[in-house]
Amino acid sequence: MIARLFSTLFLAIGLIACVNADSANDPTNKTYEVSSPDGVIKVALSDEGGELRYSVSRDGLEVIQSSLLGLRFSKQHGFDAQMSIVDSQLSSADSTWEQPWGENRQVRDHHNLLRLVVRRAKPEQSMNFYVKAFDDGIGFRYEVPKQAGFESVEITEEITEFNMDQDARAWWIPARKWNRYEYLYNTTSVDEMEMAHTPVTMKLTNGTHVSLHEAALVNYSGMSIEHRRGPNLVANLAPRADGGLVKLETPFVTPWRTIQIAKDAPGLVNSNLILNLNEPSKMDDISWFKPGKYIGIWWQQHIKDRTWGNDGIHAATTEATIEMMDFAAEHDFDGVLVEGWNTGWDGDWYNNGDVFSFTETYDDFDIEKVSAHGRKVGVRLIGHHETSGNVTNYENQIDDAFKLYEENDVAIVKTGYVADAGKLKYIDESGVTRFEYHDGQENVKHHLRVVEKAAKHKIAINAHEPVKDTGLRRTYPNWVSREGARGQEFNAWGVPPNGPNHVSHLVYTRMLSGPMDYTAGAFDLRPSERPPITEAMGRHDKRSRIEHTLAKELSLYVTIYSPIQMVMDLPENYRARPDAFQFIKDVPADWDKSIALSGEIGEYLVIARKDRNSDDWYVAAHTNEHARKVDFPVNFLQEGDKYLAQIYRDGDNADFESKPYDIVIEEKVVTSDQTLTFDLGRSGGVAIRFTKQSAASN
Ligand code: NOJ
Ligand code: CA
């Protein structure tokens, strides 16, 4: 407490304005500074020349060059000229909060907060600006209070800039392109970037690692990063179909604009900045949501063994589901996802948004019978609502749809919004049809309506083709997972498949935003080479394949976090390899602690996680197309204890192209003072379970 008081006082003294000596006597030219609690990250703000600007450094090295801040509106003057900082307050906070489920049980929120009141001279109008500086980065947001002439606004431009080292390496996917977030990552200089979705991650030439994103995207449009010239990066908000970018009533706050900053790539993975910038949970009780693993009637359709609709070999039959439930029960998995149980899938289902029913089953799927069987064997049905982009058709049925699922014990629903970017169909009360972006303001609001409605039925949501994650799981802990990147499905239909380096990109980009339903666990790495079930169904192009070794597929259960992990392959493929399957059966989906140990963006990652419900630790590593040696001390294990390490590693000849199934499964006793070394094959990996020997011998 006393220490906290001192740090607040110290900061308050450090805050005194006028760092800029030339402007010391000019009240309209002031510079303010706020630092991270460890003093390493520094943010400077100024109103020089009537513009609000900021810059950021880490350890004396430049991160963000002088960059503009502000908002513009269609009917009011912007907060973009004649601006002066008229008041400021500095405070600090240090607290620890608990995640009901997650990568870490305890999360420390330690930051310094600078609040500025910024006034435009003519006409007189003001806004508040907040900057929070943490040891792992910064967040800032605008707040527009209610004031004369500002009852409601239409934002036409957010002029927030993130001017960066133009020679920095950037890892990014394009924004506003038809396939939403489902692209392979580009690696270019900042100067060669196009408009990118966030998180966009960079390594500066001074070695600093940076990721730009946003937190708490509520009632606002998603922010992409537009590259203009040289170092100039600018916020670009998804447009609304009825004009403008965002429509709001005052008072309002924007989402936090976030800059995660670390000296190395694992530092970004270990950051809790996005969660810390979200509001605490709004839900009294989330104990009904249980993290876990699920299998599904899903891959069958993607590899063309079966169809979603009744226009081929229908996958979602009562018998097939019961069989799946028995397999899940036998191996202790919690749920069975069933896709294609409801009417509307026949033909090109991605164009069937207008005809999907969310309550009417196909004749060969008896939902009551299936859920009764689930109750008997202790496995739950996982629901599926594919909208094919007609959001209004979904919302019109949503109450009945959730009611039906609740009655049938469904506790998790996977939603889907397969439609090109900018083509989500909304029909307003007067019957006017509009087409919105997946990250547009209307769809941001839709997702939260779904999540809040689902909670009333004790249902958790896993959204595919979603809006990106901005940490809202803290506030709405039933929003448990989502897609929002290229997942495993692309390896079924390729061409090209995701390739050997995709997951080495994901863990340093998409995964910084939150859990992903990647759907790991492919045991048949060449599904397109299976003989087709019927001539008519055929197979996908033979080049569609999983370009990983088997050990790397196992490693994904640890490296790619989600509280619900799919075990995506067909039961027959797991039955064929019971030894490797054991890892998937053992690995938990809920963690007490997570520590990224080493890695490089796009290259490799080594990460350790401790199980939330036992003393077990897990470590996994994977590499891109390059074979590599990884070593790591296991000093996270309890000192003085012996652990049994069950190791699933690449064999000596493992290689994603020539020998993907070359795996060695072995056991070793280890103690915390040891360092372990592994040779990973090309696109290979390793997955290890550490069990306390005392516990193991009980
Ligand atoms: C795309 C989703 O990502 C996939 O998982 C699902 O099977 C299909 N849509 C059908 O809803
Ligand atoms: Ca998808």
Image: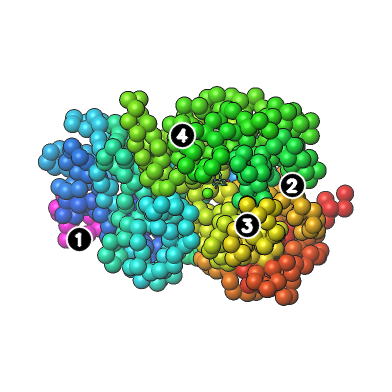
Instruction: Determine whether the residue tagged by mark 4 lies in a helix, strand or loop.
Output: loop
Q: Earlier in the sequence, mark 1 or mark 2?
A: 1
Q: Secondary structure at mark 1?
A: helix
Residue wearing tag 2: 614
**Residue at image mark 1:** 21
Q: Secondary structure at mark 3?
A: loop
Task: Give the foreground label among 3 and 2.
Answer: 3
Alpha-carbon span between mark 1 and mark 3: 71 Å
Residue 95 among those drawn in magenta: no
Q: CA distance from mark 4 to mark 2?
A: 47 Å
Residue at mark 3: 539
Percent position of residue 158, x then y: 28, 47
Instruction: Identify the mark nearer the N-term, 4 or 3.
Output: 4
Question: In the image shown, does 503 or 321 lie closer to the viewer?
Answer: 321
Counting residues from the start of the chain, the first of labels 1 and 3 encountered is 1
User: Which stretch appears magenta?
Assistant: 18-29
Q: Is mark 2 within 8 Å of ligand 1?
A: no
Labels 1 & 3 near each other (Cβ < 8 A): no
Near mark 4 (Cα within 10 A), the count class, few <14, some 14-19 or many ≥20, is some
Which residue occupies 56% across, 44% down? 481
Q: Is residue 19 magenta?
A: yes
Distance in Å between CA atoms under marks 3 and 2: 43 Å
